[in-house]
Amino acid sequence: MLNPDPALRVPNPVRGKTNLKLKLKIKLFKLTKVFTVAILAGFALVETAEGQSSESLLKKLVEKGVLTEAEAGELRNETNAENVIKPNSWVDSITFKGDLRLRYEQKHQDWNSGGQLSRQRMRYRFRYGAIADLQNDMKVGFRIASGSTDNPTSTNQSFDDAGHNDSLNIDQAYAQWSRGGFTVMGGKMPAHDKTGWMINKGLIDSDYTPEGLEAHYDLEVGNLPIGLHGGWHSLYESSGETDDEGLLIGQLTTGHKFSGNTDLKLGLGSYWLFNADQIKADTVGSAGVAHKDSAGNSESGNKVVSNFNPYFLDAALTYKGWARPLKFSAMYLNNPAAAASSEDTGYSLGVKYGSAKKAGEWEIGYEWRHLEQDSAWAGLTDSDFGAFGARNVALGNGNKYYNGTNVEGSLIKGKYQLYDNVKLGFGWGITDAIKNDVSGTDKTTHRFSFDVIFSF
């Protein structure tokens, strides 16, 4: 029999009630499924103390008549699909890292004052940051650190006031892309020893985090590893100048494994300060490129005399055949653009025995450094390597302690890993100004430091 025209149908109250019940039942079943899936998802994440599982819950619901076996099977399949482990998002790939160093420090001339007061101070260094792996060959990193904004080679904060709050500054903020041995990064980047360079701390301090762009390429030629490194670092930007000051730097690194116990690493590099006429000799209160507490370059008025395009050769030989590793290191430096050829050279010779990385391990090292006046720009050198009289002109500051160039002497350092995350450190610098034009500041400078370092 053909169905009548829908417009001519007569409502059937019995059939209407049946359809209504069916619709309610379907809705109830759907709501029950949603509620049950939510419960099962919760149990999948956190099991109860009795170890109740999603499977036991399903069986209970079938026993109570809430679900049929067919419906339980359907929910079981949906729950399993919900709990399939998915790849971590980039948020799950963030790693955090920090350290706190407490230091007692003293520096003075000779074993008596020598006309210069002995200075004693307590200091701390706090650093904390994170790296986010975006899982598309890209990473983003940042770090905050204690210290001032006018000394890029130190993040120390002295105990120098009545408990006033101290500052935290942006020490790193960068992005990098890596693929197939090639890495490009930009922003306020990590220190050179963290990004593949091989540069002696005497030339560029390991706390210096450059601003600019860098590119690195690692490859192998036969069994010989080759590293190509290049970068542009911003030094000074001014709205009143067309050309800004900066630094171009490049290095070739390589190495060779003589045996299972002996490694040799080599680096040959150079940097060039462009628009160097804007580099200032005054360490405080001058426009242009100047870094607090750094000095030693030849000066004329408040400007440095020389240009700077030094080349530097680094070498490190490590032997691991003994109970502790033994490492020899050397650096040679020459600046062809120095104002005087007698003041264009620097070098370093060092030895270290041991390696303090795990609890109970220790190391001790010795290094001799010689940095003539214009062998390098004083603004980037080791902040812990200096002397009274290093600034060799009597401009009111010549008899003060400065780190930088025009300094030579010994560095003795030791470390002991008390726990995996706590380290003890000791340092002793015995230094002299190479050239000294200021009367009364020609005695040996001693600088002691005692550290406790917490890593987390």
Image (cartoon, grey):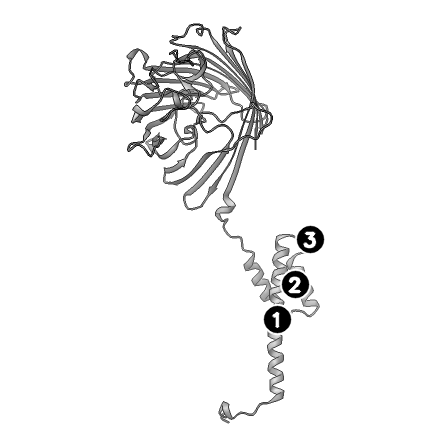
Q: Decide if residue 52 is on the left or right side of residue 73.
A: right
As measured in the structure, the alpha-carbon distance from the residue carrying label 1 to the one carrying label 2 is: 15 Å
In the displayed structure, 232 sits above or below 367; it is below
Q: Earlier in the sequence, mark 2 or mark 3?
A: 3
Mark 2, Cα crowd under 10 Å, few <14 / some 14-19 / many 20+, is many
In the displayed structure, 398 sits above or below 360; it is above
Tag of residue 48: 3
Q: From the image, tell me which residue sits under label 2.
A: 58
Q: Element under label 3?
A: loop
Residue at 56%, 29% in the rendered image? 100
Residue type for callout 2:
Leu
As measured in the structure, the alpha-carbon distance from the residue carrying label 1 to the one carrying label 3 is: 26 Å
The quadrant where residue 235 appears = top left
Residue at 39%, 40% in the rendered image? 178
Q: From the image, tell me which residue sits under label 1.
A: 29
Q: Is residue 314 visible?
A: yes
Residue type for callout 3:
Thr
The one nearer the camera, 352 or 104, is 104
Residue at 36%, 40% in the rendered image? 180
Q: Is residue 3 visible?
A: no
Q: Decide if residue 411 is on the left or right side of residue 310.
A: right
The quadrant where residue 372 appears = top left
The one nearer the camera, 400 or 24, is 400
Q: Earlier in the sequence, mark 1 or mark 2?
A: 1
